Image: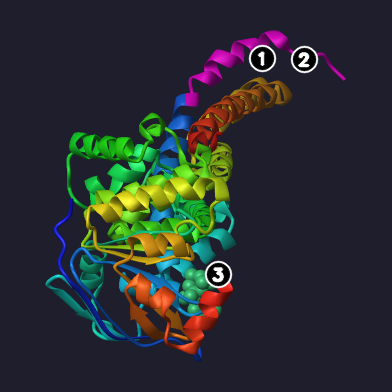
Amino acid sequence: MRALDLEYMWGLVPVLLGYVPLTLFMALVGMVCALVLASLMAVERVFRVPLLDIFVRLFISFFRGTPLLVQLFLFYYGLPQVLSVMTNINGVTATIMGLTLHFSAYMAESIRAAILGVDRSQWEASQAVGMTQVQMMSQIILPQAARVAAPTLVNYFIDMIKGTSLAFTLGVTELMGATQKEAAGSFLYFEAFLVVAAIYWIMVEVLAFAQRHLETYLNKAHAR
Amino acid sequence: MTSSSGISVSGLTKVFGTTTVLKDISIDIAPGERVVVIGPSGTGKSTLLRCLNFLDRPDSGTIRVGDLRIDAKTASGADILALRRRTSFVFQNYALFANKTARENISQALITVKSLSRSEANARADAILRETGLADKADVYPAALSGGQQQRVGIGRAMALDAELMLFDEPTSALDPEWVGEVLDLMRRVAEERQTMLIVTHEMQFAREIADRIIFMADGHIVEQGPPAQLLDLPQDDRTKAFLRRVG
Ligand SMILES: Nc1ncnc2c1ncn2[C@@H]1O[C@H](COP(=O)(O)OP(=O)(O)OP(=O)(O)O)[C@@H](O)[C@H]1O
Ligand SMILES: [Mg+2]
C-alpha cells in the first residue's frame, strides 16, 4: 500500500472542474427535453389517443428495456450508417439525445402515475367550471401531479448527471473522459478517479439540497 | 346578478351497466326559479345533476339551457363545453382546486374560461370573498380552510360564473354540523338574488324556506312535485309520505 499523492489530487481539482460545465450542460438540456417529452407522453397515455398510444407504448418499452449505453452506441455509431442526416452528429448531441429519450421513457411513467393519482374531484371541478382539457391539464392537473412526481423526477435528474459520464465512450472529453486522460498520463488512477468521484458526489449533494427547497415550494398549498 | 332564462330537460335517461338510474326524466325550470330535489339514497339525484352538465354523460334525452339545446345522443365536445359554461356546480365534497388559493379558486375560471384580465378577475374574486365573509382568507389554500369555509369558496366559485343554472349536490351533507348554518345562509343569499337553482339536499327546513318547488324522486323517476307547502304537508304518493315520515 502506498500513500495518496495529495498534491497531485489537489492540482487535478481545478483541471477537472473545468469540465463540470459541459457535464451540467448535457444533463440540463437532456432533463428539460426529457421533461417536455415525458409530459407529452404521459398525457397521451392518460387520454390514450388511438394509434399514437401504440407508438408511445412501444417507445417507452424500448427505451426502458435496453441499456443506455446500447442506445448511445446506436445513435452515435449506428444511425449515421443508415441515416444521412445523422452523419455529422457529434458526441455531445448524441449523448443529449440518448439521455433525453432514455430518461423520458422512465419519467413518462412516473408522471402518468402522478396524473392518475390526482383526485377525481379536481378533474370534475375543472370540467364543471367549463375549462377545456388543455386548461384543465395545464392549470390544475399537471401542477398537482408535479408535486407528487417531483422527488422521483429529481432522482432521474441525478441519474442523468451520472449518465453523462457515458459520453466518454463516444469520444467526448467531458468530466469522465478528461479524468481518464489525466490518469493515463500520470498512472495515478486511484487519485484521479477519487477526485472525479468527489466532484460527481458534490454535484449530486448540491442538487439534493435544491430538491428540499423545491419540495417545500411545491408543498406550499398543503401546509397547514 | 345573473341573466336567467328557462331550462328544459326532456326524456333524460342514464344507464350504469345494467341498471337504469334515470328513467325518462323531464323537468322545466323557469328563470329565477329555485327547485329542490329530495328523495331516498341511491335514487339518482346526484346522477341527474351530473347529467345536466355532462359530468356523467346521459344516454338519451335533450337539455335546453336558454337558447342552447343539446341532444345527449349527438352532443359534441363543443356542445358539452358550451353547456358547462352556462351552468355551475357546487359539490358535496367542495372539490376546490387544491393547488389554488381561495382567491384563485374563484378567479381561475374567470381568467381561463371567461377571458377576464387577471386584475379584473381578482377584483371580482375579492368582491365575492367579501360577500361570502372570507375576505381574510383570500391567500389561504383549501387544505388550511375549515369545511364550511371551503364550501363557501366552492359556492363563491360557482357564483362568479354567473351561470344560467346553479346546481348544488348536497352541499352541506359532508360538513360537520357546526358549519352547516353558515353554508345555508350563503345559499339563502344566492336564492334571494333570484338565481336559478337546482338543489339536492336533505335539509327539509331549508328547502321549505327557499324552494319555489320541491321535486320528490324515487327509483330514477319524478314521483311528485309541487310548492313546499303542498309537497311537504299534503303529499299524495305513498312513497313520498313514507320518505317524509323517515326524514321527519
Ligand atoms: N359511476 C357509477 N357507476 C355505476 N353506478 C353508479 C355510478 N354512479 C352512481 N351509480 C349508481 O346509480 C344509482 C344512483 O346514484 P346517485 O348517486 O345518483 O344517487 P343519489 O340519489 O344521489 O343518492 P344519495 O342520496 O345517496 O347521494 C345508485 O344505485 C348508484 O349506485
Ligand atoms: Mg347523491
Viewer-closest of A18 and A190: A18
Which element carries disc 2, helix, strand or loop? loop
Magenta stretch: dominant secondary structure: helix
Q: Which residue is mark 2?
A: A4
The boundaries of the magenta stretch are A1-20
Q: Nearer the viewer, mark 1 or mark 3?
A: 3
Residue located 54% across and 14% down the image: A14
Quadrant of the snapshot with the C terminus of chain B: bottom right
Q: Tag on residue A9? A: 1
Q: Which residue is mark 3?
A: B248
Asked if the beta carbon under badge 1 is closer than 8 A to the nearest atom of ligand 1, the reply is no
Disc 2 and disc 1 in contact, CB within 8 angstroms: yes
Image spot of residue A132 (x, y percent): 28, 60
Image spot of residue B229 (x, y percent): 36, 72
Gap in Å between the C-alphas at discs 1 and 3?
86 Å
Viewer-closest of A99 and A72: A99
